[in-house]
Structures are given as C-alpha cells and as structure tokens.
Image: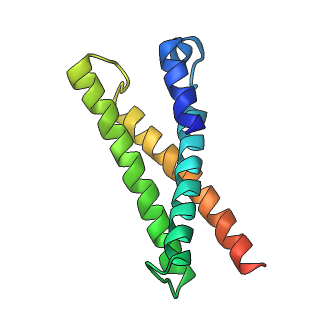
Amino acid sequence: MIVFAIHILAINFQFYALIPNLDVPMHFVGGMAIAASAIQLINFFEKNKFVTFNSHWLRAFILVALVCLAASIWEMSEFSADLFLGWHLQYSLFDTMKDMILGLTGGIVVIISWAYGKTHN
C-alpha cells in the first residue's frame, strides 16, 4: 500500500518527470511488496486450513505466479490508462517489458529470502 501511495504522489507531483529512471526502483520495490503480500496471503490460507502445500517448491512457484499476475495486471492497467485517459505511462514495448522484469525480479528476491528463512529455521 505504501508503494502504491508513493506511486500516486509521484504521478501527481510529476516526480517521474523530475527524477529520471524513478520507475526502476518503484517497479522493483513494487514486486517486493507484491511478493510479501502474496506470502502473507498464502500463510493466511494455510493457517486457516483452506489449502495445504506439501512442497516448498510448489509454494514458491505459486508465489512467483502471483507476482507475475500482479505485474501483468499492473502493466495492463497502465496500458488502459494510456489508451482511455490519455496518460503516457508506457513509452515502448521495451519499457513495459523492463517494468515487468523489474517487478518479477523484486518479487523473486523476496521469495528466495523467505524460502531461505523457512529452510534454515
């Protein structure tokens, strides 16, 4: 939620125009926040016996898939804002792919850290 709030402030106060490449850390940290939220969601489902994972690999795969889904929805939202609202959030296919890769990389960093902590406790 904090990352999203910073993003909204950055848009409203033109920080993305004032600070070159500000979107790079924002997408990376956004992926981290999405992964942390997905971990909490899975923990909630497991704690309440809605689902049980017998494999850390399956859990990690689902977490990566959730981060990919969120990054895809985010970029589709930017595309829609460009198309219907006249915003200019996506500059090129390269920019869009870079954003998705940064988000996924941030998410994977959190997932690996989480998995490492689970196996070494």
Identify the residue shown where x is 30% and y is 39%.
76
The percent position of residue 105, horizontal first and vertical second, equals 55, 52
Q: Residue furthest right?
A: 121
Above or below — where is 27 with respect to 54?
above
Query: Quadrant of the rendered structure where residue 18 is?
Result: top right
Type of colouring = rainbow
x, y percentage for residue 44? 54, 68
Residue at the bottom extreme of this rendering: 54
Q: Quadrant of residue 91?
A: top left
* Image quarter (top left, top right, bottom left or bottom right) of the C terminus: bottom right
Q: Residue 29 location in percent, x, y? A: 60, 42
Q: Is residue 31 above or below residue 53?
A: above
Q: Is residue 100 left or right of residue 105?
A: left
Residue located at (43% from left, 60% from top): 66
**How many circles with numbers are drawn on the protein?**
0
The quarter of the image holding the N terminus is top right
Task: Name the residue rendered at 59%, 49% in the picture.
Answer: 32
Query: In the picture provided, is 24 more to the left or to the right than 90?
Result: right
Please name whichever residue, 10 or 37, is drawn nearer the observer in this view of the structure.
37
* Image: 73 above or below 41: above
Report the residue that reaches farthest toward the left: 84
Up-down relation of residue 91 to residue 25 (above or below): above
Where is residue 46? Give x, y as percent. 52, 77
